[in-house]
Amino acid sequence: MFMKPILAAAAVAFALPALAGDITIKDAYARASTPVSKSGAAFMVIENAADQPDQLIAARSDIAAKLELHTHKQDANGVMHMMEVPGGFPIPAHGSHVLARGGDHIMLLGLHKGLTQGETFKITLTFRNAGDVTVEVPVDLKRMPKMGGMKMDN
């Protein structure tokens, strides 16, 4: 009876980094607004130990009909809009790029089933230089955004 919550917590707490060549993926997680949402998002930290920059150019998964690389941008009226970034995200040499709520993220469009706390699914990230990296992504519906979520300009 108590095993399911314990296993769910363990899956979220012990998500291991994914490695491929010089690319390391850390702290991956996904969430959706509600259990029946048809879209969700995945977040993570992408580290590049190479001497050359790389670029995250695509993502795919069986969890949804389509995955897109997205960001948030503020318009002239101060309204935040989410939009696809067709060229992807640059990952600097010996640096990192954070995919976080209120910023860059992987949008999960047309979820085939709801995201359930503690479950995991795989996303394959495609990098220009490093190629494909498959990441085990835990669903964490309880995680609160760091520093209040959305980045706002003053």
Image (cartoon, rainbow, N blue to C red):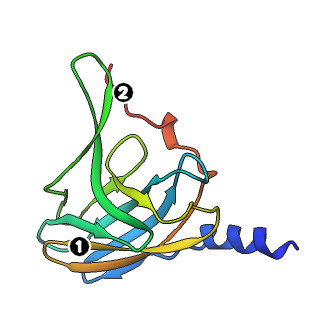
Q: According to the image, label 1 marks what residue?
A: 126
Q: Residue 102: x percent and y percent? A: 39, 40
Q: CA distance from mark 1 to mark 2?
A: 30 Å
Q: Report the mark closest to the observer, 1 or 2.
A: 1
- Name the quadrant containing residue 78: top left
Q: Is residue 35 left or right of residue 97?
A: right
Q: Does 67 sit above or below residue 122?
A: above
Q: Is residue 92 shown left or right of residue 65?
A: left
Secondary structure beneath dot 2 equals: loop
Q: Amino acid at mark 1?
A: Thr
Residue matched to label 2: 152
Whether residue 43 is visible to the viewer of this picture, yes or no, is: no
Residue 3's place in the image compared with 143, above or below, is below
Q: Residues within 10 Å of mark 1 (few under 14, many from 20)?
A: some
Local packing at callout 2 (Cα closer than 10 Å; few below 14, some 14-19, many 20+) is few
Q: Which mark is residue 35?
A: none
Q: Nearer the viewer, residue 63 or 139?
A: 63
Residue at image point 29% right, 82% down: 20
The x, y position of residue 144, in whole percent, is 58, 45
Residue drawn where x is 26% and y is 16% of the image: 77
For the residue marked with disc 2, what is the amino acid? Met
Q: Quadrant of the N terminus?
A: bottom right
The picture places residue 130, in percent across and down from the top left corner, at 19, 78
Residue 37 rendering spot, x and y as whole percentages: 53, 50
SS class, disc 1: strand
Residue 87 in sight here = yes
Quarter in which the C terminus is drawn: top left
